[in-house]
Image (cartoon, rainbow, N blue to C red):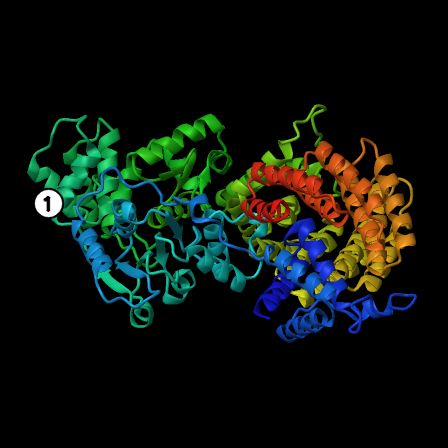
Amino acid sequence: MGMALSAVSTVASGALSGAGGETGRRISERLCDLLSRDRAGGGEADTGAEGGGLRQLALPVTEPERMAATLRLMEIARSSPESARAVTEWVREASWLAPRAVAHGASRPQMLPPASAVFTDRADVLAWITALLDEEGRPPGAPTIAVLTGPGGIGKTAAAVQCAFELGERFADGALFVDLNSASGTALSPSEVLVRFLEGLGVPTATVPGDEARQRDLYRDCMADRRMIVVLDNARDDAQVVPFLPASPGCLVLVTSRYRLGRLVGEYGARPLSLGPLSTEDSVSLIRRVVGDNRPPAADAIVRAVVEATGGIPLAVCTAGASLAVREHLTWERVARQLSDRIRGHDQEGAAVREGRSDGSGTPADPVRLAQDVSYSELTPDCAAFYRAIAVWAWPTVSVMCAAHAAGVGEAEARALLEQLARVHLLEEVGEERYRFHDLTRAHARELADAEDGHGRMAAAVRRVAVAHLRFAAGADFRVMPLRWRLGPAYQRLVLPEHRDRADGKRALAELRRERENLAAVIEAAAHHGFDDLVWQLCEAMWGLHLKLGFHAQWIDTHLLGVEAARRSAEEFGDPRAVGRMWTQLAFGYMGLGQVGDAEDALKEARAADRACGHHRGEATAVEALGLLRLRQWESVAAQRCFEEAQQILERIGRGEDGWDDLPRATALLEHHIGRAQTKQRHFTTAIARLNDALARFRDLPGGDPYNEGRVYMSLGDAHLDSGDTELARVCLDNAVKAMTEAGAGLQLADALVARAESHRSAGRPAQEAEDLRTAAACFEENEDPVGLERVRARLAEAEA
């Protein structure tokens, strides 16, 4: 009973989001078929000529509905030995769709940022954590939780990362790391962090559940019995930490925060430790390490004067030392004098030093701010302007592309200037040609930009960054899904190379994924500055990324901005078609989280917006999307009506009008959808005719569409299998395998092979079944899908037993 309920819940959740791909769809439809069986004999229920019995079924979405479906399965299983076998087999198959932990040995994430090469002291922190780990009497299932608190710049992150590296041998299963506050200073959502952790733990992005509760369950499953370090950096409060606490006594959780986390201590047994400034002696050791041996040693008194001005705050010490390390003309005496002058509130010429607070935490006498001011004063005018420009928005990471366009310089110059700022400790390099500000340093640079450049120049920098990211994202999205219809001038004149590498689409998707967080930040920045035309186009350019990989929380956040931007833009002579487009794309984001009501409302808004501006292509897409939602809900009759209505809307498009060029492909897709809906109503003759018509339409497209030809062949295989014609089903699945091979669609090829293996099993061909499963396993392995690989290997073991 428990396994059946879990299987029903997994399949029902995945059906709405499209999780599990073709395999998930087939298993969902198989559940619908099982629940439609006659209670008495295990055969099909009397559905009537129009499929009335099937029409009464609905995907079990709520918990009571899922329990009722499970009880119905149990009743069917008891009706006959044949039904019992069918239910048992379905539960076993469905269990493989459940998001699951990857085998421990398959993924040992190492997500820690680089440790500081000049890390000094804090031996007491390591000793304290070690004592916690060796402490006896901890409750079963409770991880060790250590909380490092202190003000910004005190070195909490550096201490946590250094200790994690020092203790690495005790935690052989790896380390997870996240900065819980985004670069903009807003807390990351639990879902966003869980997605990052699950990916690090080896769960394929496309199989990560859309809803937070299931993500949390999967995370805890992945962490069970592992020995891992989890570093949760920069927590704002207790609630932000709790979702990521593993229920594993073999784990160490290191939390850093500027605030006291009382609930974590009181309810979860965390141990707090407050970090203070370094001693003068340790500060001297640290700054000498930062400065290095390339300049003559300074007198102890001068060095002490410098570090005393920094207050022993590691960030200030490193910032002051980094300037000395790279600027030969800069003397210890000059730095000491500059710091002293700023403490008194005057520069070397006696003028008053700029005052002001960046975020409520800094004052003119703040040691970190003093060191940053000294370092900034030594920059060349070009580098100083660059420093201010890249801080106009809180980009998650500063890439060369981002920096170049923010500052309005070439990439070669941007690359050199980024390296200069990193050398003087005003930036931190966090990856290949990727940099990040400490939040206090970005606040310093942003304040300077506001004072010296003004809003106009800052807004212009944001627009340049947004345009550059739109150009990049549109180009990559075009490579991911070249045949889809799209809106926006960013796609004009984009063409694919004549001899395109089959792996190019996969590479483009990886490029979009690497820039995902920056793209979301660019949308937020553009919306803040009122660049509505860029906001909705950026959302459009992320369609391929979200459709293929999910990231539903970000999808919804960005597209809510996209909807509002498109509305405002349309009111100001922008493209009115964008409003419906944003609503439709937002609806798919809601589907991914199983929010059916929100998805329906969004599609209603989309249709109204498209109808209001006479955009037939957009209105047809909204109606088609509603049909796909109904099909996922098992409402095949309602789905068919939507698809047929979408076809009628497309017929209103005249030659040369918007959408005319896309009509052949759009009509072919709708024919395919209608054929699938008729198959689920068991109208096999008309369904097969529709599917064959769809196949012919795809073949007639200029250049063909092997991917969608393969999908139609798979649907034909399903229709023939359901009608009892296993031989024709095998022929269609042969063609599906051939088409997906031609399309270079690795995971879809694996799905086709698995489907053909099922047909071989139904026909009693075990050797062919095993051969297809072995080939499918190779496809899953090549395309880095460990869950699919594990599922197929289990099936293969059964077939060869």
Q: In the visual, does 222 lie left or right of 680?
A: left
Does 486 sit above or below residue 562? above
Identify the residue position indicated by label 1 in the image: 281
Viewed as shown, does residue 580 lie left or right of 151? right
Q: Which element carries disc 1, helix, strand or loop?
A: helix
Relative image position of residue 689 (x, y in whole percent): 91, 48
Q: Is residue 234 above or below residue 239?
A: above
Give the residue at x 49% y 50%.
102
* Residue 603: x %, y % from top left: 74, 60
Please tell me which residue lies in front, 318 or 253: 253
Q: Residue at x 69, y 62 (%)?
A: 85
Query: Image quadrant of residue 60?
Result: bottom right
Residue at 41% from the left image edge and 60% from the top image edge: 244
Position above or below: 510 against 539: above
Amino acid at pointer 1: Glu
Q: Residues within 10 Å of mark 1 (few under 14, many from 20)?
A: few
Q: Does residue 604 show up? A: no
Residue at (30, 52) in percent of width and height: 355
Q: Is residue 228 left or right of residue 490?
A: left
Quick check: can you spot residue 426? yes
Q: Quadrant of the N terminus?
A: bottom right
